[in-house]
Image: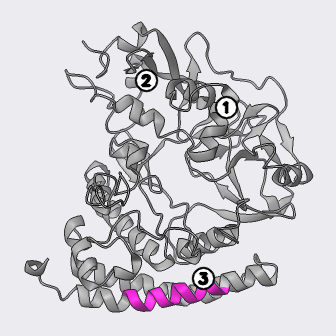
């Protein structure tokens, strides 16, 4: 059997192998043949027989077909776990490997990735006890490191890369021993300890000013509207840093030391078995000769994931609300890696939302939509016809679209002004930016109410 498509015993016979572990239990063996770039995956029989066991993704079920897994499916899953952009460059340089060497990168970063699994060398098991006390990061040290980012990347601490989650923005994963407003302390993590929060500082570049306030506002607005989002707060060194609670981690108390349980999540690229370069609907970009190629994650592809979920009605409604909220806040960059699902043995469940940012506030950034409404790749081009087209492609009743859009718009108009007055924004610049966001959201809510009402009247034959 060709190991390029995965089959029983392929991984154990591969020249290179890593074991995957979840909470002290071996899950699978990942095999890699470098010269031919062949990947394979064998689940451990003990894991498959566990009642609560779950697969890595729908494309990598616990029981593969007779032909094995689809060609490239294992590699696509793994590459979606890695950081992107400058963070990937830093990781590759620090580890002295090519940034195209996915196996080497997951070998270096795989002890603390997104989701439930740790990637571990095949001749060892992850430690059950910490070799040393956790490494605290003080407010003063974090402030100094933020000031030195041009010289020493934030991803590197004590000579080791600490960035092992997907994304382009600077991030640092930490363990928080208790809430920050109760004197909580930040710690770097080493196995067996897992991180509980992600720190996202203000970017060094000036093209996205007040990004911490922007994301905090949008996330907090969603929470006020009773939408399921990750918890956020602002930590000041005194430089503003967004602190995001990890929803794929649960702190369990009861023993001598708290234990962090890892929950398995995958993003929409992994759920769709697509590589990271397909996270935008126009996966080849918007150049004249490729702009009509739309093979990446679109709203239609995203809604197709409903068939993989445990509760399809809940999943469809969650995706509809997510899409409408992106319209309300003007998040042009809501792409295929910005929506995730919990993975159960029975199927997928939508995870809380994250990375909610009003990209429209930054004129220096391209505002092309990551996912088109109908055929509109610009927010300004979205009209009633495009909303109706979106609904038809995604299998959403237009009257449901109208009701939900009207409801969310009303909630946004109610809560956007209140969030703008939050005490979290402490100076004139932050308060002015929050007021700018308020005005934009209220304007979008008014527009959405009108467009959704008109969209409901468009007959299917016109689409």
Mark number displayed over residue 179? none
Q: Is residue 308 left or right of residue 66?
A: right
Task: Give the image location of residue 34, x and y in percent.
Answer: 45, 16
Q: Is residue 30 left or right of residue 168?
A: left
Task: Give the image location of residue 295, x and y in percent.
Answer: 28, 51
Q: Is residue 135 magenta?
A: no
Mark number displayed over residue 437? 3
- Bounds of the magenta segment: 435-448
State which quadrant residue 112 falls in. Answer: top right
Nearer-N-terminus badge (3/1): 1
Looking at the image, residue 377 lies above or below residue 142:
below
Q: CA distance from mark 2 to mark 3?
A: 48 Å
Judged by depth in the image, the label closer to the viewer, 2 or 1, is 1
Instruction: State the SS at label 3.
Output: helix
Judged by depth in the image, the label closer to the viewer, 3 or 1, is 1
Report which residue position mark 2 lands on. 47
Q: CA distance from mark 3 to mark 1?
A: 38 Å
Q: Is residue 352 left or right of residue 237?
A: left
Callout 1: few (<14), some (14-19), or many (20+) C-alpha neighbours within 10 Å?
Answer: few
Instruction: State the SS at label 1.
Output: helix
């Amino acid at each position: 059997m060709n190991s390029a498509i995965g089959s029983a015993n392929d991984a154990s016979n591969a020249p290179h192998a890593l074991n995957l572990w979840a909470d002290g239990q071996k899950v699978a063996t990942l095999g890699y043949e470098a010269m031919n770039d062949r990947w394979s995956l064998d689940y451990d029989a003990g894991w498959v027989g566990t009642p609560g066991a779950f697969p890595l993704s729908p494309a990598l079920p616990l029981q593969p077909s007779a032909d094995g897994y689809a060609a490239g499916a294992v590699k696509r899953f793994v590459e979606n776990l890695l950081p992107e952009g400058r963070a990937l460059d830093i990781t590759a340089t620090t580890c002295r490997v090519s940034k195209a060497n996915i196996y080497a990168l997951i070998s270096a970063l795989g002890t603390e990735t997104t989701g439930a699994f740790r990637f571990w060398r095949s001749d060892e098991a992850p430690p059950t006890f910490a070799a040393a006390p956790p490494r605290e990061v003080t407010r003063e040290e974090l402030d100094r490191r933020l000031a030195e980012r041009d010289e020493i990347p934030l991803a590197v601490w004590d000579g080791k890369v600490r960035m092992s989650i997907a994304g382009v923005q600077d991030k640092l994963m930490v363990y928080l021993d208790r809430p920050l407003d109760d004197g909580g302390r930040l710690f770097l993590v080493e196995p067996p300890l897992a991180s509980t929060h992600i720190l996202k500082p203000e970017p060094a570049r000036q093209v996205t000013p007040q990004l911490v306030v922007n994301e905090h506002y949008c996330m907090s607005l969603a929470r006020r509207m009773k939408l399921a989002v990750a918890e956020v707060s602002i930590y000041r060194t005194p430089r503003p840093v967004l602190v995001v609670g990890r929803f794929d981690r649960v702190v369990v108390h009861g023993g001598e030391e708290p234990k962090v349980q890892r929950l398995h999540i995958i993003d929409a690229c992994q759920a769709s078995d697509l590589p990271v370069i397909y996270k935008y609907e126009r996966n080849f970009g918007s150049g004249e000769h490729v702009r009509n190629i739309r093979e990446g994650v679109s709203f239609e592809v995203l809604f197709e994931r409903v068939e993989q979920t445990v509760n399809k009605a809940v999943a469809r409604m969650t995706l509809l609300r997510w899409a409408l909220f992106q319209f309300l806040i003007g998040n042009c960059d809501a792409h295929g890696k910005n929506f995730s699902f919990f993975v159960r043995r029975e199927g997928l469940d939508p995870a809380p939302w994250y990375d909610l940012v009003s990209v429209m506030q930054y004129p220096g950034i391209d505002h092309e939509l990551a996912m088109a409404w109908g055929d509109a790749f610009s927010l300004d081009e979205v009209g009633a016809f495009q909303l109706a087209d979106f609904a038809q492609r995604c299998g959403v009743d237009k009257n449901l679209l109208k009701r939900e859009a009207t409801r969310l718009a009303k909630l946004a108009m109610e809560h956007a002004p209140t969030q703008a007055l939050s005490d979290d924004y402490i100076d004139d610049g932050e308060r002015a930016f929050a007021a700018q966001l308020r005005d934009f959201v209220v304007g979008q809510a008014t527009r959405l109410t009108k467009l959704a009402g008109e969209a409901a009247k468009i007959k299917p034959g016109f689409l």
